[in-house]
Structures are given as structure tokens and as C-alpha cells.
Image: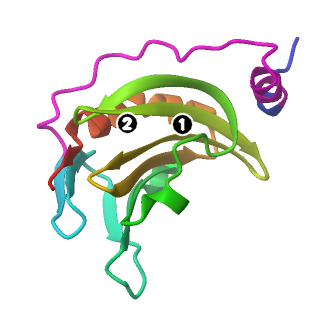
């Protein structure tokens, strides 16, 4: 029996020795499903899965950034949306860890790249998208300690992406 080390595979992909593409996912559900969330101050809206919790993770604010967390705690899955008003120094548009694959996508008609990556301390799997719109940086992030959990939530991730709208 062979055991595949995801960190080793990610290192080979990163070094260009292996080329992986994201598996084709099932088309996202109609974006009208789920629970609506609107952040008028930061200029976006989205829908997150029914049964997930939402909490404002922003500390004492300076009016220039915002961080929202959406999670399915019992399944160990979390989504975050981080908005920063000054994107030039802080907009993360690359992978969060060692990249496994990437795909160009559109977020409400804005071009972006959807990254899937892995980190090893502790082993965690991520998907993230960073996009600059109207002079602001929007980073959408999903993470789990299990690749199986991340893959099991692909339809949720796809639906959140499909429902995301800039409101500025």
C-alpha cells in the first residue's frame, strides 16, 4: 500500500515537477440559497451555507479593514472574508501555503485566481481568492485540517463564490 504525503506532493507541484489541475466541481447551487450577509461599510454581500454560523472577527476598527468568519464548527470547516482599504501593501492574491493548484476565475465580473494550497504546521488545507476592486482588497478564504472536509464542502465554496457581489 502506498501512502501519499500531501506536503511532498505540494512541494513537487510548487517545484514544477508535477502539474495538477483542480478537479471539475459540480456546478454551484443557485446563489439564492443559504443565508444572506451584507457588509455595507465594506461594500460586499454573499450567501453562506444554512447551518453555518457568522461572526464579526474585527477588533477595534480603524474603518479601513474588516474580517468576517463563517463556520461549520462541527465539521471543522471555516470561511473568512477579509477586506482591506489599502491593497497595494496587503492584498494576498497568491496561495496561502504551498500551492497544489490554481484556476483563473471571476468574482462578480472581476478577474482573480482561485488557489488551493496546503501547509504543514499543522497540516491544513486552504482555498483562497484575492481580488482588488474599487481600490479595496477582498480576500476570500476557506480552510480545514482535512482535505476530505475541504473537498466535501466544494459545493458550499462554489455557491459562496457565485453569490459574492461588490456593492460599491
Image quadrant of residue 26?
A: top left
Q: Secondary structure at mark 1?
A: helix
User: What residue is pinned by disc 1?
Assistant: 149
Let me know if residue 130 is in the magenta part: no
Asked if 72 appears above or below 115 in the picture, the reply is below
In depth, the one of 92 and 149 nearer the eye is 92
Question: Which dot marks residue 157?
Answer: 2
Q: Is residue 15 left or right of residue 157?
A: right
Q: State left or right for residue 44 relative to residue 116.
A: left
Q: Residue at x 15, y 38 (%)?
A: 33
Magenta segment boundaries in residue numbering = 8-34
Residue 25: in magenta span: yes
Which of the 4 image quarters holds residue 95? top right
State the separation of the CA atoms marked 1 and 2: 12 Å
Q: Secondary structure at mark 2?
A: helix
Q: Is residue 153 left or right of residue 26?
A: right
Q: Is residue 57 left or right of residue 22?
A: left
Which residue occupies 69% across, 12% down? 19
Quadrant location, the N terminus: top right
Residue at the extreme left of the image, as rendered: 32
User: Residue 104, position in %: x, y?
Assistant: 44, 23
Percent x, y for residue 158? 34, 30
Question: x and y percent of residue 141 in the render?
Answer: 47, 48
User: Between disc 1 and disc 2, whose residue precedes?
Assistant: 1
Amino acid at each position: 500500500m502506498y501512502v501519499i504525503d500531501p506536503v511532498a506532493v505540494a512541494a513537487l507541484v510548487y517545484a514544477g515537477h508535477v502539474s495538477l489541475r483542480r478537479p471539475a466541481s459540480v456546478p454551484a447551487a443557485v446563489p439564492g440559497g443559504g443565508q444572506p450577509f451584507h457588509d455595507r461599510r465594506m461594500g460586499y454581500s454573499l450567501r453562506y451555507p444554512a447551518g453555518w454560523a457568522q461572526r464579526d472577527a474585527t477588533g477595534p476598527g480603524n474603518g479601513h479593514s474588516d474580517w468576517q468568519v463563517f463556520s461549520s464548527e462541527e465539521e471543522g470547516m471555516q470561511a473568512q472574508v477579509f477586506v482591506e482599504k489599502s491593497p497595494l501593501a496587503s492584498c494576498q492574491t497568491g496561495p496561502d501555503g504551498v500551492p497544489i493548484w490554481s484556476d483563473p476565475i471571476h468574482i462578480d465580473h472581476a478577474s482573480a485566481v482561485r488557489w488551493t494550497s496546503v501547509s504543514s504546521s499543522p497540516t491544513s488545507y486552504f482555498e483562497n481568492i484575492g481580488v482588488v476592486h474599487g481600490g479595496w482588497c477582498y480576500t476570500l478564504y476557506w480552510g480545514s485540517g482535512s482535505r476530505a472536509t475541504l473537498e466535501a464542502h466544494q459545493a458550499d465554496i462554489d455557491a459562496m463564490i457565485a453569490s459574492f457581489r461588490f456593492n460599491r
